[in-house]
Image (cartoon, rainbow, N blue to C red):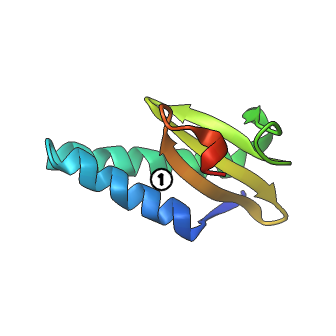
Amino acid sequence: MGTYRLRPKAVQDLEATGDFIANDNPARAVSFIDELLVLCVCIAERPDAFQRRNDLADGLRQVVHGRYLVLFTPDENGVVIERVIHGARRLEDLI
């Protein structure tokens, strides 16, 4: 079973997303962040199953969850979650 780790920017992304959603619905903010963290476990178990994004960075892959993208790179221990961002953002400026 693979593992995942979060880059500092991914942690900041999760915190900002949770804060944004909590403005309208604190309970949903908690459940949405939980969903994303469960997704990270799934990513670590099968990283090759997800879409490549070599157009943004070598080895980068992505998973869509609702309106959010989880961007990650596989490594020898599992995966590194690089960013968790809203799909409407300009990805080229964030990577």
Q: Position of residue 10 (x, y in %)?
A: 53, 60
Task: Report the label total.
Answer: 1
The residue positioned 37% from the left and 50% from the top of the image is 33
Q: Position of residue 62 (x, y in %)?
A: 66, 38
The residue positioned 14% from the left and 42% from the top of the image is 24
Left or right of 94, for residue 78: right
Secondary structure category for the residue under label 1: helix
Left or right of 73, for residue 23: left
Label 1 packing within 10 angstroms: few (<14), some (14-19), many (20+)? some
The residue positioned 63% from the left and 57% from the top of the image is 82
Q: Is residue 81 above or below residue 53?
A: below
Left or right of 32, for residue 41: right
Q: Position of residue 58 (x, y in %)?
A: 85, 48
The residue positioned 17% from the left and 47% from the top of the image is 27
Q: Residue furthest bottom?
A: 8
Q: Amino acid at mark 1?
A: Leu
Q: Quadrant of the N terminus?
A: bottom right
Q: Position of residue 84 (x, y in %)?
A: 52, 49
Left or right of 20, for residue 15: right
Judging by the rendered image, the residue that carries numbered circle 1 is 37
